[in-house]
Amino acid sequence: MPDIGGAPVAKARLAILISGTGSNMAALLYASRLPDCPYEVVLVASNNPAAPGLALAAAEGVPTFARDHKGVPRADFDAILDAELTRAGVTHVALAGYMRLLSDGFVAHWAGRMVNIHPSLLPAHKGTHVHEAVLAAGERVTGATVHLVTPDLDGGPILGRVRVAVAPGDTAETLAARVHHAEHQLYPRVVAELVSREVRPEALLDRVRALALALPEAEERLTHGTPGFFVRGGTFFARWSANHHGDGRTAVLVKASGVEEQAALIEQDPELYFRPAYLGPAGWIGIRLDTGAVDWDHVEDWLTRSWRASAPKRLARLPI
Ligand code: GRF
């Protein structure tokens, strides 16, 4: 078994957007305080300064942001919101009763990292007045769904669902209350799964491997017990590094042009780049993958560059 490492990873930094009560926000927050939860709640934001959930978040010591959206064009409002999320170092967003359509730009920016909870078994009963619709349709079973947010309202890929029986005599209110209980179980679990999926060393290595092996004549071989990638007829161009000598980092190591560029990169972004042990003097650079928000295009660019520097001449000239 190759050692892919058990480096401690940074927790995902979750923002929760609410417009009202915020009971799902509370469920996400309290779950985050249990041992081993892979996310922390770093911001609760609202388009409704009177949302009761804001007061709860503040009482719990969670930073809040509130701005009334009225009179502010949607794209401008979302830009303000986005700036707050960036300021708070948010990596993921959970919508929890956020009753405002989001602009396409905002949705695109958080694609794959923004989820919503909806009180039905999607794809059934999208939109509002869900419990009334469930009762009117004579459903015996309803539930709750967590899905990724896409421009298609309540239509993004489903990440998890939980079933709730419709009981005899249920009204929209009694049903809503029970569905809420189910939502509170579902939401923290699905958010935890989503953020863990991205930051587990196994998942990160899978992604690096897919990018590295997509390069011409690239192969994988263990080097010093950890996975490395080399070009046939050439040399290693990337190495996996996870908790190397207990350094606590999960990273991919690639070749920079030399120690000068290496130093410049580290100075430019010391949270992302580091000088790896052993390979550092040879001009390699470590790119951290445990930051909670990996820019995979950037990793791909580096792998390609490093591949080119390692490939035999006949390959290095190939347009990629
Ligand atoms: C929940 O039913 C959720 O499914 C829907 O809005 C409601 C929010 O409730 N999107 P709360 O504010 O979390 O109590």
Image (spheres, rainbow, N blue to C red):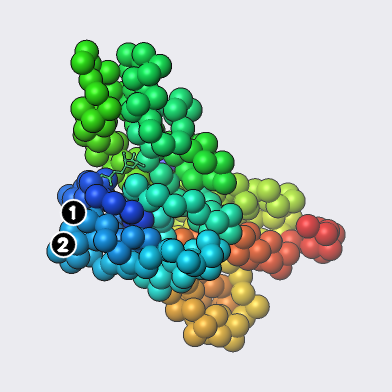
Type of amino acid at the residue the image marks with label 2: Glu
Q: Residues within 10 Å of mark 1 (few under 14, many from 20)?
A: few
Quarter holding residue 138: top left
Helix, strand or loop at label 1? It is: loop
Extreme left residue here?
Answer: 59
Quarter holding residue 108: bottom right
Relative placement, left or right, of 168 versus 48 is: left
Residue depicted at x 74% and y 61%: 311
Real-space CA distance between mark 1 and mark 2, rounded to the nearest whole angstrom: 11 Å
Q: Which mark is residue 60?
A: 2
Nearer to me, 282 or 22 = 22
Instruction: Classify the position of the C terminus by image quarter.
Output: bottom right
The percent position of residue 296, horizontal first and vertical second, equals 57, 58
Q: Which mark is residue 132?
A: none
Residue depicted at x 28% and y 23%: 164
Name which of mark 1 and mark 2 comes first in the sequence.
1
Q: Which residue matches tag 1?
A: 33
Quadrant of the rendered image holding ligand 1: top left
